Amino acid sequence: MELEDLKSIWKSSEPVFQPKNEQEIAMMLKGRSISIINKLKRNVWFELVFTIVVSVALLIYALSLPRGAMKWTSISLLLMCLASTIYYVKKLSVLNRVQGINENLHDTIAFLITNLTGYLKFYKNSYTVLYPIYFFLGLLFSVMERGTDNFVEFLSNPSTIIYLLFMAGVFFFISSWFARWFLKKLYGDHLEKLKSILNELNQQ
Amino acid sequence: MAIAEEKNFISLINEHQGLIHKVCIMYENDADVRNDLFQEIVLQLWKSFSSFRGESKISTWMYRIALNTAISGYRKQTRLLKTEDLREMHLNISDAGGDDYDENFQKLQWAIRQLSEIERAMIMMALEEIPYEEIAETIGITQNNVRVRMNRIREKLKKLMCP
């Protein structure tokens, strides 16, 4: 069976489909895109706005505090939020440069893989940094609530240390598992699919 | 000006919608998901319409955007057909009476759907008489690579259609 035979079969009929009229097509142009780029843009926008709102709230809260650990804790969180804001703005500028899918398939897939990998890496790294920070913030709040002397006494009990280590382990395990699951669900499967397609394209 | 451009675009899609439907049918099983994909392809074509300068044939440009959208730009998960479903579908096609051409066409459609996503894209364009040079440009591989792959695809289709 030669290619010409396949062509003649292909042209002999048409697949069954419901044709769209011009009104339906016009309506489609007003619809919302569900492309991966648009989804990424929407997510990044959402996170950017959320980070800005949290930053403003933290700034107001930090300014209202006279001094002390809570003020510095708020300021350190604020700095982390500002660093994230810079990342999100940079990410949006990259995504906004993609106007439609005009490149060839190989380049489009390579671009998507780079972007999705960077996005997922950023989240994984953020979580890796944030978990210990949250844990130590928790300890810090405990010190502030009990007072340093009481806290040291509380910590000198071996069962307390075991309890704290256990809680740290559980906290780290659950949040890491959740982050991995969430990211995989969000983009991970799609990323794997793209990688396997690119791999196929790179083979001779 | 913008209205005229939109009007032109709509009539262009109306005229060539068979091409988009073919891509949707080859890449999605579920009718609802196919509709979503159709809309997404139309939206992506509309976004790229202003940058289309007629350097390639309109069908080549449409295939480029449609295949890019179906393969890489679209994340919706669909129910995958199980092997049993596919076998059953194949048997139904084989058992169906009627026109030989129609039966062969359905067999060919079924066989194309068994190929990988890249192979599907390549054979669809080849069947639409798109030159190898443009297939190579659309996919992002060399013409020589297209030739080699097309031979493999043809062999695969042959085995699938005439086991």
Image (tube, coloured by chain):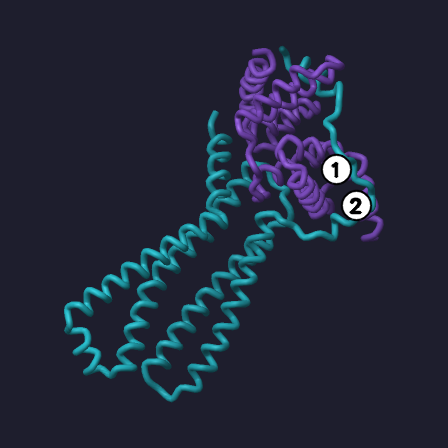
Chain colours: A cyan, B purple
Above/below status of A119 relative to B66: below
Q: Secondary structure at mark 2?
A: helix
- Badge 2 local density, few (<14 within 10 Å), some, or many (20+)? few
Q: Secondary structure at mark 1?
A: loop
Q: Give the side of residue A66 with respect to residue A51, left or right.
A: left
- Image quadrant in which the N terminus of chain A is located: top right
Residue A127: which disc?
none
Q: Give the side of residue B62 with respect to residue A182, left or right.
A: right
Q: Which residue is painted at 70% across and 19% down in the image?
A: B105
- Of all chains, the one bearing label 1 is B
Q: Position of residue B121 (x, y in %)?
A: 61, 29
- Of all chains, the one bearing label 2 is A
Residue B54: which disc?
1
List the single residue furthest toward the bottom.
A66
Task: For residue B57, say whether it is visible.
Answer: no
* Residue type marked 1: Gly
* Residue type marked 2: Glu
- Badge 1 local density, few (<14 within 10 Å), some, or many (20+)? few
Q: Position of residue A39 (x, y in %)?
A: 58, 52
Q: Which residue is painted at 45% across and 69% down in the image?
A: A81
Which residue lies under the disc numbered 2?
A24
Q: Which residue is painted at 26% across and 79% down in the image?
A: A143
